[in-house]
Image: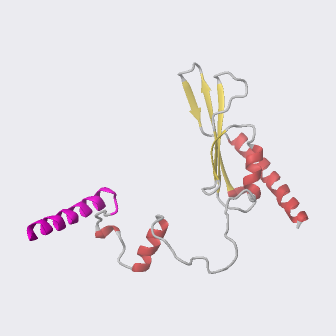
Amino acid sequence: MPFIIKTAKISLILSVILYLNSCGIYRPTDAKEFPPEPSKRVQKNLDEGRGMRLFKNDNKGGGTFDFATSNELWRASLDTLDFMPLMSADYGGGILITDWYNENNNYEDYIKISVRFLTNEIRSDSLDVKVYTKKCETLNKCTINENNPEIENKLISTILTKASKYKQEKKKKK
């Protein structure tokens, strides 16, 4: 009887170890990768998105939403690019990416725009706009260029103008 109990215990321990190893909970790491100071380790884990905090919100007020729909820059960017199909819109990450757009329904000239929000403030350096143009000779032979400062500057100007109007309207409502 004791042999069966020992075998059961050993098999249980081995199955738990195999389970923990297979699901990725246990990951062997090199001690050189982590700083010895606890505060630096905590900061590194927070920067990488690891760990959890309990009772983080000491102020009893609401949360902050960095790029929510109430943000004037976000709304102005969406309104400016509303004619183009969006491939990705992540207000948490602060980025808008459109899909390739062609106004003439031919395969020759396409445009794609990416807007990154660097800050919530309505300033010229708060947006990083990149415009990609694709010119195709045939369906399979295309060249893509990233630099188009004329359109980039026009987009930034239009977005900032709309955002400042939205901010003024918001102040009037208050």
Task: Please name the residue shown 72% across and 54% down the image.
Answer: 74
Left or right? Give the position of 51 relative to 70: left
Q: Residue furthest top?
A: 138
Q: Main secondary structure of the magenta part?
A: helix
Where 142 sits versus 145, above or below? above
Task: Please name the residue shown 21% across and 66% down the image.
Answer: 13
Q: Quadrant of the C terminus?
A: bottom right
Residue 3 lies in the magenta stretch: yes
Left or right? Give the position of 1 relative to 136: left
Q: Is residue 156 visible?
A: no
Residue 20 locus on image (x, y percent): 30, 62
Residue 140 locus on image (x, y percent): 53, 22
Task: Judge by depth and name the residue closer to the eye, 163 or 142.
Answer: 163
- Tell me which corner region of the image, top left, top right, bottom left or bottom right, holds residue 68: bottom right
Number of marks in picture: 0
Task: Judge by depth and name the residue closer to the eye, 155 or 50.
Answer: 50
Residue 78 lies in the magenta stretch: no
Q: Residue furthest right?
A: 172
Q: Which residues are magenta?
A: 1-25
Left or right? Give the position of 71 relative to 59: right
Residue 157 locus on image (x, y percent): 78, 49
Q: Is residue 13 visible?
A: yes
Task: Please name the residue shown 75% across and 37% down the image.
Answer: 83
Residue 11 locus on image (x, y percent): 18, 62
